Image (tube, rainbow, N blue to C red):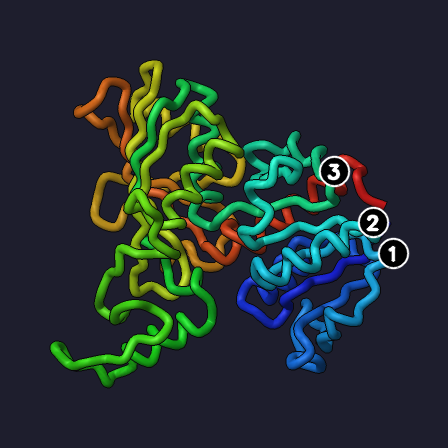
Amino acid sequence: MGYKVAIVGATGNVGREMLNVLSERKFPIDELHALASRRSVGTEVSFGDKTLKCKDLETFDFKGIDICLMSAGSAVSKDYSPRIGAQGCVVIDNSSYWRYDQDVPLIVPEVNAAAIAGYKKKNIIANPNCSTAQLVVVLKPLHDAATIKRVVVSTYQSVSGAGKDAMDELWSQTKGKYVPGQEVDPKKFPKQIAFNCIPHIDVFMEDGYTKEEWKMLAETKKILDPKIKLTATCVRVPVFVGHSESVNIEFAKPISADEAREILRNAPGISVVDKREPGGYITPVEAAGEFDTFVSRIREDATVENGLALWIVSDNLLKGAALNAVQIAEAMVAEKMLG
C-alpha cells in the first residue's frame, strides 16, 4: 500500500533533502506533491529520477493526503498546520512553532517513538531542533544504562542550519577574495562568518542564553527526561553542512568509556568511530550525506564522579531535519497509524 504525501517548502534546503530521503529509503508513495509559495510555483525539484513542478500551497487541497512534511518556517506552519490537520492529513513539522505545545508530540524515533501516538490531538507531530536531534540519539542509550544527571554541551553548527542565504554568505566571503583584516559586509550573520566563529545562534534571552541554547534544554527534557539538567553554548562555524558537539555528561551510576563505547555501537542510528590516533574520529566533512549520527573521542571525565566526554557529529539537514521527519512517517506506517 502506498500513501499520498505532500512536501511544503519543497524548494528549500530541507525540502529538497526530504525528497531525496523519501526516494533513497523507498518510502511507499502513491502520490507525491511538491508545494511552495506562489512565487515558486512551477519551480522544478527532483524526486529520484523524476522531476516535479511545485504547486501553490495556498490553493492546494489536502483532503485525501495522508502525510504532509512541513519545512516552510514557523509562520507558515502556525497558519497552515492546523488547517491541514483538520482535513485529516498528519503534519510532520520541521519548524520550532509546535515543539513546546503539550498536545503535540516532539519526536526522535530512536528515542521516543511510542510518543507518536499523541499526534491525534491535533494531527501534528514536531521535529526537534537539529542540534537537539543528534544529541538525544546519543544520550538515550547512555541514559538507559546509567541515568544522566547533567549535560554540558558546546555546539559547532554549520551555516546550512541558517538556510541557503547563510551558505551563500559563507561562500561569498571565502571564495578567494578575503584578505585578513579586510572589512566584510555581513548580512545573514551579525559578524563575518568566513574564518571565524560566532557564539550567537537565534535571539538573546533575558538570562543571557540564546534561544538556540534554550531549545536544547527544553527539547531534551521533553523528548528524553525532564529531570536531566543541561546547559549549552551554541556556536556558528564556517562549515557548510554538519553540526558537531562537544559533550560532557554526568551520570548517577558508574559507566566507563569502554562500556559507553559498546552501548553506543549497539544503539540504533549511531556509528562509533573512536580510534585514539590522528584522524581516528569523524568530522563534518565525513558526516555530510550520511544518515547515522557519529560518536568519537569517548573518554572518562575525571573532574566529576561518573563522568564521560564525547564528540558527536551529524548531517544537520538529514538527522537534524529531513531524515528525522521521514523516520517519523516510517514509524507511523509500521504501526499502521495512517490511511
Amino acid residing under circle 3: Lys
218 on left or right of 178:
right
**Earlier sequence position, callout 3 versus callout 1:** 1
Labels 2 & 1 near each other (Cβ < 8 A): yes
- Residue 276's place in the image compared with 80, above or below, is above
Mark 3–mark 1 distance (CA, rounded to whole Å): 19 Å
Q: Which residue is mark 2?
A: 88
Front tag of 2 and 1: 2
Residue at x 35%, y 16% (from the top left corner): 252
Mark 3–mark 2 distance (CA, rounded to whole Å): 12 Å
Q: Which mark is residue 80?
A: none
Image quadrant assignment for residue 95: bottom right
- Give the image location of residue 170, x and y in percent: 33, 73
Residue at x 30%, y 24% (from the top left corner): 250
Residue 283 showing in the rendered view: no
- Give the image location of residue 311, x and y in percent: 31, 42
Front tag of 3 and 1: 3
Q: Which residue is mark 1?
A: 64
Work out which residue is located at the far left of the displayed protein and give it.
181
Residue at x 64%, y 57% (from the top left corner): 77
- Give the image location of residue 235, x and y in percent: 30, 54
Q: Which residue is mark 3?
A: 121
233 on left or right of 72:
left
Around disc 3, counting alpha carbons within 10 Å, would you say few (fewer than 14), some (14 to 19), or many (20 or more)? Answer: few
